[in-house]
Image (cartoon, rainbow, N blue to C red):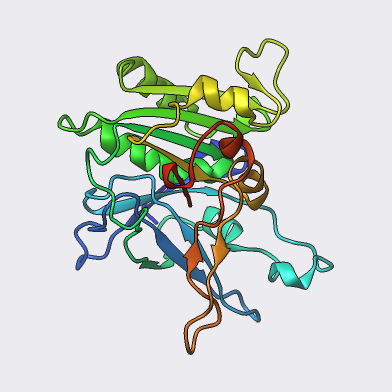
Amino acid sequence: LVSTESISPDSKLLRFALPSVLPTLGMPLPSCLKVKYAPAGGSTLDKSYSPVSLPNQTKYVELLVKGYPPRSPDHPGTHGAAGGLGHFLVNLQVGETADMEIKAARIIHGDLWRSGRWRELGLLCGGTGIAPMLQMVRTLLSDPHDGTRLSLVLANRHLEDILMKDELDKWALSHPDRFRVRYVLSSPPDSWQGGVGWVDVADVKAGLPPPGDSTLIMVCGTDGFLDTVSGPTVRGPPPAGKKQGPKLQGPLTGVLQSAGYKEEMVYKF
């Protein structure tokens, strides 16, 4: 761990140095890491995190991590051991290390991401689901040769829960022709001018590009968030020797289906 920065009351931006044999992550958008942690006396935990730093960033990688509090001893065992990856990561001290591995390149509807594949990219996320979207925004808006138009709808409970809001607002101001953002709060302050409640069809129509062959909507958030806006991902049959099958997109349901999008226009993280 090279540095740490508090982003919200329970979230931090963590910068980890890359090993000398790995100049960059070397992965196409959107990249993904698996973090592993073996607590004393417990079984090994692992969780996937999407870096928010650019894929070609040299020397370091950045993760946006929410530090959920340790679980009580009576917490259901089906949810894993007390503590967790987020709690472990946000409590690391500068100089300490974390065990990570680079996951396979993400295939989006049969192919890797490439510049210009879609003219309109809608990003629909809740809470820390902003992480892969932030990498997309940072990377595409930093590329002078990419003309993809980006629209973000970000859902949270409270105003102070919105992660990286200052940066998102700066991008929207500096790239008004290519990036726009709509925030939705379920418990907004009295003076709030954005979306209110749970993400609904009105939020989607106001903040995302309309359905079309050159449009892709990326979705990321909790299981409950996906259930509401797009339907969950599912697992295929496990191959021989494996405990679980490959992650599949599953049917499109929820808000996005009601708004007129088709399955080939939506990608669920």
Q: Is residue 162 left or right of residue 94?
A: right
Residue at the bottom extreme, as displayed: 241
Q: Is residue 24 left or right of residue 86?
A: left
Residue 181: give x, y in percent of width and height. Answer: 46, 23
Residue 87: give x, y in percent of width and height. Answer: 60, 57
Residue at the right extreme, as displayed: 74
The residue at the point 26 percent across, 57 percent down is: 27
Residue 253: give x, y in percent of width and height. Answer: 61, 45
The residue at the point 60 percent across, 54 percent down is: 232
The residue at the point 47 percent across, 32 percent down is: 164
Would you say residue 200 is visible in this rendering? yes
The quarter of the picture where the N terminus appears is: bottom left
Figure check: 256 above or below 80? above
Residue 147: give x, y in percent of width and height. Answer: 22, 28
The residue at the point 68 percent across, 70 percent down is: 80
**Closer to the camera in the image, 107 or 141:** 107
Would you say residue 5 is visible in this rendering? no
Name the image quarter holding residue 42: bottom right
Figure check: 220 above or below 81? above
The total of numbered circles placed on residues is 0
Figure check: 120 above or below 244? above
